[in-house]
Image (cartoon, coloured by chain):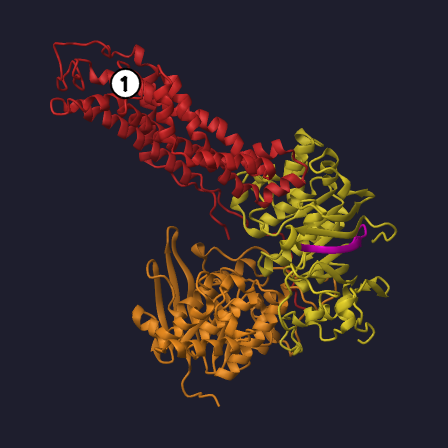
Amino acid sequence: MSDIVTTFELEELSLVEKPEKKKPLGPLFWICVFWIVLNIVGAIFANVLPLQNPLYQDYAAINAGPSLHHLFGTDDIGRDIFSRIVFGSRVSITVGFGSMLIGFGIGSPLGMLAAYRRGRFDAIVTTFMYILLAFPAIIATIAVLSFWTPRSVFKIIIVIGLASVPLVYRVIRTATLSIATKDYVVAAKVQGATDRRILMKELLPNIAPIGISFLLIGVATVIALEGTLAFLGLSVVVPTPSWGNMINESRTVLQQNPWLAIFPSLALCLFLLGLNFIGDRLRSHFDVTEVKL
Amino acid sequence: MSDVNEKLLVVSDLSTTFATAGGPLPAVANVSFDLNRNETVGIVGESGSGKTVLSRTIMGLQPRTNVTVTGSVLLNGNEMVGAPESFKRGLWGTEVAMVFQDPMTSLNPVMRIGKQIDETLRVRLGMSKPDAKARAIELLELVGIPSPKQRYDAFPGQLSGGMRQRVVIAIALACSPKLLMADEPTTGLDVTIQAQILNLLDELKERLHMSVVLVTHDLGVVATRTSRIIVMYAGRIVEIGSTRDVFTNHRMPYTRALLESSPKVSNASHTRLITIPGRPPNLLKLTEGCSFAPRCAYATDQCHQDRPELRPADQPGHSFACWNPLPVTRGELAS
Amino acid sequence: MTDTTQPLLKVRDLKVTFGKGHHEVSAVAGVSFDVYEGETLGLVGESGCGKSTTGKALMRIVEPSSGTIELGGTDLTKLKRGGKQLRNIRTHMQMIFQDPISSLNPRRRVKDIVAEPIDCWKTVTGHDRDVLVSDLLSKVGIDPAVYGNRYARQFSGGQCQRISIARSLAMRPKLLICDEMVSALDVSVQAQILNLLEDLKAEYGLTLLFIAHDLAVVKNVSDRVAVMYLGKICEIGPADALYEAPAHPYTEFLLGAALEADPDSPMHSQVLEGEPPSPMNPPSGCRFRTRCPNATDLCASDEPQPQEIAPGHQVACHFPLSVTRK
């Protein structure tokens, strides 16, 4: 008895009404970006900026406090701290980004491929990497840099870069594993997409956010590591300034010249804080795992 | 015989609202119903209908922050709304117990099942260790677990889905509650296991003189095992009545649409299914009027402007919320 | 309607085994069936019966251990894994998965997802490609102008499943394997998708292999149904006939346990007791004998082979129930 019309068969009426609202990055995010960019620009153009000569020893102004002439004061042999910080940022930033470039350049493709292909390749490479991970990277770095003299920024980048490959490999591999098993990757394979196409179109866009934020945090870690190496006298050779070097030098004259410790430390801290914050913000901004009804 | 003097559960004008970033979310709104002793009631609805939030609010299990509950829930005379946690805890297990959907997450995977049942007995009833163990083995036998003495020492991971759900039921029944809330207890289990579990619940209900509230989206689960059914949509009750009335004399178009949109084994192959266009509404953006109006084929202007209250139908105990109810049909399932 | 001359898909003694030695599990233990062009074959069974694994083996998402799969004459098992021929064949067979949300790349736009197969094979480019994509989206009920540019993550389960369907039709496959495609959807959305599937099947001349555990859903879409238990097919036959009068005891229990939304439906007091045996250690002879009320010694010693008891209706049982009793 269906005299009553019960065929509600229409196309779906109310689909998604609104385009998506992304979580705003916030003003603090942009301040950090500005700060990081400022540092990088300063490092690149240090030569042409109106700075004091970082190597010039002004014996008239040893351990001087901040003044108009020397914005951050001078160190124990009269060199201008401010310009040394700017020039020193070159070392820190180059080492930071350079070694991460090597680490990611080698670790990511290997990790992605291993997680996607699985099988023997994955088993061999992962075992190898996990064995490497068992060695404390810092000790290895210290050991190599002690013997591979004379030191240069280039050598430091290579050593730290290679030392970071196993960790990058692990992070990228884990991230890829959780994505490679998703149905849409299987669907792509079933449609006849080549492996290369799948890696580029399906996997990479989903790994990139994690990768980028890990990259930035990695840069921060490496810069801090450079500071540690400087403490052990294993960073760039003096008189080349680096933030780590300067903090190291300040140890002996801490009483007389606290500025030599404070300003490079501040520069280091603020730069790292900025990088960490940006990395973290990006990660949560790109998090698309909310489940819709 | 059942004691009909005092109702086991009286829910009056219960509303649960969540405070979210997008505004207040009225997950349950103005729900009222009661439950007699030894009665089984089914609460049916789709996702987002509010049935799970309702069952948890009745238990008193809603989160403590960002939630506002108004109205009253009288469980055997005890008021649950606004009661302090310690008071509610006193009732959990002894007066009311809950069986959840996924047995793997309701059982502690690293604790032996015997111990999990013991725990309840020792904490709630103050039993001694040996007494609790004996009782636990009794309970395992009651819920139909073979070789209960050996299974007492098993871990949840060693049992199948059906077995685990039996253990969950055993824990729920350990202190002989008068009311059992079962929230989707068989969803995800195999059909034959589902039948076993539902039969078990029927059996236990009889034996232990319990009332059961069966919350589910599956009309098949409630068709032959409940005496009354509550149909929920967008947080409100849209129809309530005896099982027979809801299945064969329903008045609210949503109830019909729900009944007719699920394929039936008794229908021939390739039967065209009746569908409801669109999706359940966004509770943050409820419009005036009946929540079902945007999807209803019979909606009029009044439906879009005024929200209908529950009004009684011809049969006793049967009410529905609709301005344009379906005409009264006599007896048979409209198809 | 149904071309009964030569089956589109011929599966013979398909076996899929996981693990080695003591831990070997035979998920699919020798399954044979045909799917004729234009028909829908339903594959039903409970968890662990091997129905999903069968579907995946047909697509070679998991590798068959032995047996043959012939699609339009070509034996898929003989094609090299990752080879060009297999890739080519894949355009004729597509699959729709259970979880609608994870079937789509959340970071890609709906238009691009549906166009992906076309872009892989470059069959159609430029303006024609856009027209084709819009057409597909409209056919599944999603307005391409309004929603084509949205990201897949913005859609609900039912909508995602529609998009998956559109994507799978892009290359006009002959065979569509639906692996529990409506199991994760709400009842009312399920009905929409099932109706849509029927419409598209007619329009595109599809052949469907519909895998599900819900008996009513399977009956609704299928012409013929195969029932699986513990890696083997117990019974296969026309949908209406099989449901009306099942020949295999397991099928009867399964139907008896199906929960009908009808307060007057007879309560089947005979519930199937016990748990399914472990696939690692299946019973000898007939796999169902440990739970079958009619089991005898013969059932333990001899594995029953499929026998035809009515036209198009086969059952693997030594003592099949009479199909003429109803």
Looking at the rendering, the stretch of residues picked out in magenta corresponds to C26-39
- Name the quadrant containing residue A278: top left
In the rendering, what colour is chain C?
yellow
- Which chain is represented by orange in the image? B
Q: Is residue B70 found left or right of B107 in the rendered image?
A: left
User: In this view of the protein, can residue B257 be seen by the observer?
Assistant: yes
Q: Residues within 10 Å of mark 1 (few under 14, many from 20)?
A: many
Residue at 45% across, 25% down:
A102
Residue at 39% across, 31% down:
A137
Q: Main secondary structure of the magenta part?
A: strand
Residue C73: x %, y % from top left: 83, 43
Q: In front: B296, or A139?
A: A139
Q: Is residue B42 above or below residue A227?
A: below
In the rendering, what colour is chain A?
red
| Secondary structure beneath label 1 | helix
Residue at 81% across, 52% down:
C36
Q: Is residue A56 above or below residue B86?
A: above
Check disc 1 and give the amino acid type.
Val
Residue A1: x %, y % from top left: 70, 72
